[in-house]
Amino acid sequence: MTLGFIFDLDGTLVDLPINYWAMFADFKQIMGMEEVRPILETVAKITDFQTRKRVFDTWERYEVAVIAKTIIHEEGMRIYKAHEDRPKALVTMQSKKATKLLLDKFKMQFNAVVTREDSFNRSEQLKMAAQKLNVPLRDILFVGNMDNDAEAAKAAGCQFKRVK
């Protein structure tokens, strides 16, 4: 039985038109590395506080810069609106600042929000969100758009629905 919902943000509820090529080029320069992908794993390994801060600040700058151009992802938003009155959380790899701006822009509300500042691990984000909702993971439907979202849902023990 589905008692609560957890949504991914980018690619599920909205489509952020971030110039990843330029952002990764900036990351390469900041980190002094040729290859920075997969970005979450690479950033998680940064031990130097200043480098990590510069990466996070740059990442957030790219996110915030495209908020005005961000559009709704129709399929994900239909699911969100169909369950507006149910307990729901948001998990995202976007920053807290960018997430707040996006939620305000599109007038979305969640009982809990978990961002990359809380965890870089999607399964951990799902567990944190379910705990904040006070709903067992087996009774959660996670709505996402990526293979790693499906894998995280399986690892966390919740149901999954993919949007295209």
Image (cartoon, helix red, strand yellow):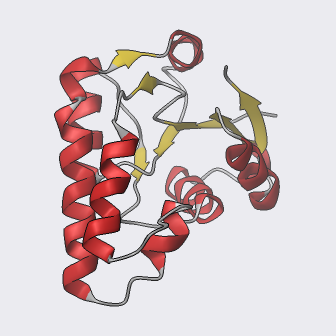
Above or below — where is 137 with respect to 2? below
Residue 136 in the image, given as x and y percentages of width and height? 71, 54
Please state, as top left, top right, bottom left or bottom right, where the C terminus lies in the image.
Answer: top right
Report the number of discs.
0
Quarter holding residue 22: top left
Q: Which of these two is toward me, 117 or 63? A: 63
Above or below — where is 120 with respect to 115? below
Q: Residue furthest bottom?
A: 47
In this rendering, position of residue 156 left or right of residue 57: right
Q: Is residue 120 visible?
A: no
In this rendering, position of residue 88 left or right of residue 70: right
Quarter holding residue 114: bottom left
Above or below — where is 52 with respect to 7? below
In this rendering, position of residue 70 left or right of residue 6: left
Q: Residue at x 59, y 54 (%)?
A: 130
Q: Is residue 33 visible?
A: yes
Residue 157 in the image, given as x and y percentages of width and height? 80, 55
Q: Residue at x 39, y 43 (%)?
A: 21
